[in-house]
Amino acid sequence: MRAVLRAVLLALLSVPRTQAVWLGRLDPKQLLGSWYVLAVASGEKGFALEKATKNIEGVMVTLTPENNLKMLSSRHRLERCDVNVVELLRQSSGWVFENPSLGVLDYRVLGTNFRDYAIVFTQLEFKDEAFNTVELYSRTELASQEALRLFARWSKGLGFLSQQQATLQPDPTCAHKAF
């Protein structure tokens, strides 16, 4: 865990200050609403082999009265659209979220311009496999060049290799089921 946080902090230093906004300084209401997930960097086993078949994902973010994040997501899996709801619990330190019982150990926004995109870091653990992801959230089906550049910079800064990064296929059919 310390190594991951150290890598995140080192990556933060490599991103211009105006672009890097920790969720601790972010009003979580700015994260609310519908997002497309357009790009992913992942250390998950098998990701490099499957990345060419992954489509754009949809996420609807809401805030509970307890200031937890409620996330409705739709992802294309095995020839069908998989829709899930997950509640992420606010950690005591700033606007960092988790739900260890579901395998989400850390969820935070690394950078955003508050309108168009967010770069999201997640530390996950499923079936004895621990891995990290960085995702590019966009309010539209096409990401800006600025958002793509920052996603690439964060991914590289956190140690993801090019084969661990993917721009998702532009088929938003399943993504729309989250909205």
Image (cartoon, grey):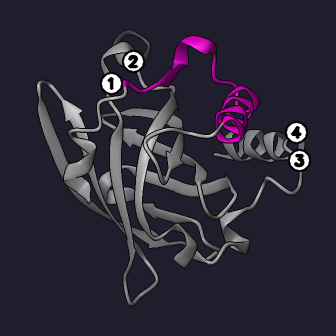
Numbered badge on residue 51 = 2
Q: How far apart are marks 1 and 4 (CA)?
A: 29 Å
Q: Quick one: SS at disc 3?
A: loop
The residue located at (59%, 55%) in the rendering is 116
Mark 1 and mark 2 residues within 8 Å of each other at the beta carbon: yes
Query: Looking at the picture, does residue 122 appear above or below residue 25?
Result: above
Amino acid found under the numbered disc labelled 1: Lys
Along the viewing direction, whichever of 105 and 117 lies nearer the viewer: 117
The magenta span reads 145-169
Q: What residue did someone put label 4 on?
A: 14
Amino acid found under the numbered disc labelled 2: Lys
Q: What residue did someone put label 1 on?
A: 54
> Badge 4 local density, few (<14 within 10 Å), some, or many (20+)?
few
> Badge 3 local density, few (<14 within 10 Å), some, or many (20+)?
few
> Badge 2 local density, few (<14 within 10 Å), some, or many (20+)?
many
Q: Quick one: SS at disc 1?
A: loop
Q: Distance between the residues labelled 4 and 3?
A: 7 Å
Residue 110: x %, y % from top left: 68, 52
Quarter occupied by the N terminus: top right
The residue located at (31%, 58%) in the rendering is 101
- Relative placement, left or right, of 11 versus 85 is right
Q: What residue did someone put label 3 on?
A: 16
